[in-house]
Image (spheres, rainbow, N blue to C red):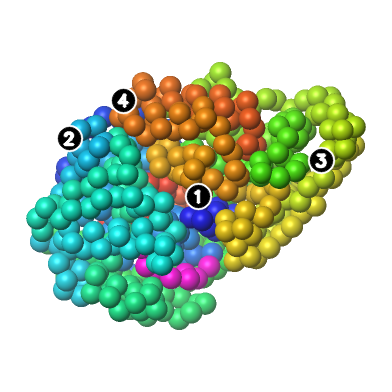
Amino acid sequence: MAAALTLALTASACSSSGDKASPKPSAAPPAATGAASAQPPAKTGGTITMLAVQDSAQLDPFRTAYVAVTDEPRLSALYDPLFAIQPGTGKLLAHLGESITSPDGGKSWVLKLRSGVQFSDGAPFDAAAVKTNWEMHADPATGSLHRAAATGLKLTVADPLTLTIAPQTPNANFDRTLAQELTYIESPLQLAKGPAVYGTQPVGAGPFVLKSWTRGSEQVFARNPTYWQKDKGLPKLDGFTVRNVPDIQQQLASVKNGQADVFTSSDPALLEKAAKDAHASVLRVDGGQYFMFNLSRPPFDDPRARRAISLALDPADIPKTLNNGYIPAKGLFSSQSAFFDPAFVQPPPNRAEAQKLFDQLAAEGKKVDFSYLIPQNPSSQKTAEYMQSRLLTYSNVSMKIEALEIGAYIQKSAIQHDFQGLLTQRWVVDPEPQLFMAFFSQSPLNYGSWKNPAVDKALLTGRGSSDAAVRKQAYSDLQRALIEDMPLWVYSEAVVGPIYNDKVTGVEVYNAGVVFMDRIGLK
């Protein structure tokens, strides 16, 4: 469910710290461009206004999607990450955590926490608190969007600052999972008050506390007076306000004219424009926007139907026609990624072959007649209408667009798996754990129902090794299977990043474009 929620929110949005990290090597991640250039130091004090495409539903670590364009900067402010991945280098950055190491190749892990940290309610930030949070993630009753990452973990408090972890199966890249899926920790004292309280009155150990929340309008955050980095002069800001502005063009205009200061976008055209008109730190990572096929029902249970759609449409024609700045994709891995294998790229468009397949299927009584499920927003609608218009130029294929509001879209796609084709989007700063959760045959998040033994083997190999060469080969094998089976068709590479005006400095990001809120400030 987490993946679908992430994708839905993302599509809707289209309308360094660290003293000691894990010593194990890992494969280089996808190349990332646009890391903030040299910036003047931020002064102490002042406030900024941050824009978001929508209000938060909750602000606890469980029921909130970790998405840079929606809630994750607010989570960064409230909780601080335990660990984070540095875009471009793939380095694991220690933050609230001091180290995460495995003595036995991923069979077990030892988490060491930073000493002297407390939650803003005075509770100690300790191993017991992390254990409580992760066990709640794993409990189905919590309804965590990140449950898959915590399921099966055996957790033992060795001492107040040490937690030992035994994954259900050996995982040489559990630190990657921790940094992306289990990195935010809420105070156990607040958790004990129940979800109605801990979701709307969150308590973390981050640089800010939630001062007020006017539903549907704005959230006001104030400096945390007990912040663990206060002796370093952090956070730089006295506070910040998040205001809801669904229109991304209005967001950019507000930042340019000084009515607001920063927001995060995944819209390629907007990021390109902002790089000229304001400031933008643009990351290119793996994933992207794609057409996901449901392999469990007609017509896409037949591989010929999936291949026909992929051959009938042209990724390069979308930005030419819609002028939306999309970067034509060659597959799920960015062309700049260290994991990208040029031997296994999506086939180029082939009109004659596509029509041949459509005709062949129709002759067998299997006409490619399908519904395409999208979240209800202008950008998704335009892209879907483009696909529909191109398919109208073929015979024996018919596409209906089903646009639903976000909640209904999530219910139908992620929970019910009730779709034939699905518009989705994903950012992948490291293949673990996202691709494992999305494509492993037994994963509850494999909502396209792609089941392939070779894929399972590749994903288990990639998860089970920290050797760069082994991981590269594993994900090359995954790319081979993606091309052979065509469970999805990627049409745009993934981009994401913060956009800000001349007053703002100290902009640094982690994972897939999340702003470190402890260091952002004013010039």
Q: In which quarter of the image is the C terminus?
A: bottom left
**Residue that label 4 marks:** 467
**Residue that label 1 marks:** 444
Identity of the residue drawn at 51% across and 27% down: 454
**Residue 165 in picture, x, y percent from top left:** 23, 47
The answer to which of 246 and 520 lies nearer the viewer is: 246
In primary-sequence order, the first of circles 2 and 1 is 2
Mark 4: which amino acid? Asp
Q: Give the range drawn in magenta.
A: 54-63
Mark 3: which amino acid? Val
**Residue that label 3 marks:** 368
* Horizontal relation, residue 367 to residue 310: left or right: right
In primary-sequence order, the first of circles 1 and 4 is 1
In primary-sequence order, the first of circles 1 and 3 is 3
The dominant secondary structure in magenta is loop
What kind of element bears circle 1?
A: loop
Spatial distance from mark 1 to mark 4, Cα to Cα? 28 Å
Q: Look at discs 1 and 4 and give the one toward the viewer.
A: 1
